[in-house]
């Protein structure tokens, strides 16, 4: 009887030891599994973060490129147009000091000065308008876009435009970025798409939304984008918005821009 009890106790001890070993191995396995899973999640998070950082770097690089091109254009405008005409004015004004000039020659110099002065003023106004349209500063985004649309409206291009954004919640800088996006969209349609109809709408529902559609030739979406699209992406990023594009060959383009109304439209 004692032998049977002893065997039973030994079996129980073996079972207990085996169970303990199983529990230990299971626990170690769970720890290893957790660590490996955590590592995979961490690596995945790092990959996502790297992709976001790369996208932001690309957008910032495009923004800097756009700014450099804009500075170059302004510098060329100042040098080739305004500075050159000011030199003409200065030269002709100096010639007026010649006491021996005939009345006819003096009138000719004055006419040259007046012409150069008028053209300089026109170029200065155009340059100032490009930097910050006066209508935008005085009357806001919707009115500025209205003026822009009216300036390019013709019998060959039908434009439908609506705007009901609450502009008081937007800074002048935000409005200017949005205005530049609209300019770029129209520029692309007019230059490349062969569109005859364009629809632009700025509405406020849950968020501010802007939609743009043309009936042009469209294009095949690829990984690479042109400078115009890069400019748009840069400004959308600055505004803290999201852009969605639907396009294909011979089916025009359809852009959707969503901007949160309860968040500042600035860099993160």
Image (cartoon, rainbow, N blue to C red):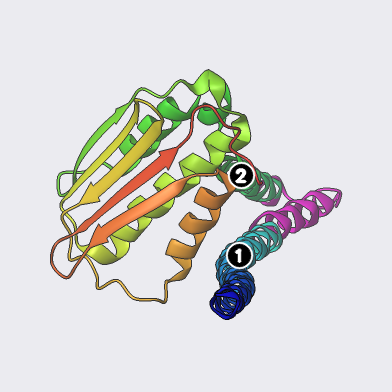
Q: Position of residue 90 (x, y in %)?
A: 79, 53
Q: Vertically, is 36 above or below 133?
A: below
Which residue is at the front of the view, 40 or 55?
A: 40
Which secondary structure, mark 2? helix
Quick one: label 2 or label 1, which is nearer the N terminus?
1
Q: Residue lying furthest front in this view?
A: 1
Q: Vertically, is 70 above or below 110?
A: below
Q: Residue 207, located in which quarter of the rendered image?
A: top left
Q: Position of residue 67 (x, y in %)?
A: 65, 59
Q: Which residue is mark 2?
A: 131
- Give the CA distance from mark 2 to mark 1: 35 Å
Q: Badge 1: few (under 14), some or many (20 or more) residues near its Cα, within 10 Å?
A: few
Q: Position of residue 268 (x, y in %)?
A: 66, 46
Q: Position of residue 75 (x, y in %)?
A: 70, 61
Task: Please indicate whether residue 224 sits to the left or right of residue 71 in the image.
Answer: left
Q: Vertically, is 234 above or below 41?
A: above
* Residue 139 visible in the current orientation: no
Give the residue displayed 19% in from the left and 62% down from the top.
194
Residue segment shown in magenta: 81-105
- Is there CB contact under 8 Å for labels 2 and 1? no
Q: Which residue is mark 1?
A: 49
Is 258 a magenta residue? Answer: no
């Amino acid at each position: 009887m004692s032998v049977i009890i002893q065997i039973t106790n030994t079996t129980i001890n073996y079972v207990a030891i085996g169970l303990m070993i199983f529990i230990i191995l299971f626990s170690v396995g769970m720890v290893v599994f957790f660590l490996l899973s955590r590592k995979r999640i961490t690596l995945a998070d790092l990959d996502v973060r790297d992709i976001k950082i790369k996208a932001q770097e690309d957008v910032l690089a495009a923004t800097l490129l756009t700014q450099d091109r804009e500075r170059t254009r302004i510098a060329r405008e100042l040098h080739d147009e305004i500075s050159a005409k000011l030199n003409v004015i200065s030269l002709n004004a100096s010639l007026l000091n010649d006491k021996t000039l005939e009345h006819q020659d003096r009138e000719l110099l004055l006419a040259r000065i007046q012409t150069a002065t008028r053209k300089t003023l026109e170029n200065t106004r155009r340059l100032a308008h490009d930097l910050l349209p006066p209508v935008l500063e005085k009357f806001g985004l919707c009115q500025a876009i209205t003026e822009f649309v009216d300036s390019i409206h013709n019998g060959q291009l039908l434009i439908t435009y609506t705007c009901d954004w609450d502009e008081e919640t937007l800074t002048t800088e935000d409005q200017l970025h949005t205005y530049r996006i609209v300019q770029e969209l129209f520029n692309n349609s007019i230059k490349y798409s062969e569109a005859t109809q364009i629809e632009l709408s700025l509405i406020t529902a849950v968020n501010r939304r802007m939609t743009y559609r043309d009936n042009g030739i469209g294009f095949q979406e690829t990984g690479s984008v042109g400078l115009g699209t890069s400019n748009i992406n840069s400004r959308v990023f600055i505004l803290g918005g999201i852009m969605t594009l639907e396009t294909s060959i011979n089916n025009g383009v359809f852009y959707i821009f969503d901007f949160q109304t309860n968040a500042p439209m600035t860099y993160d």
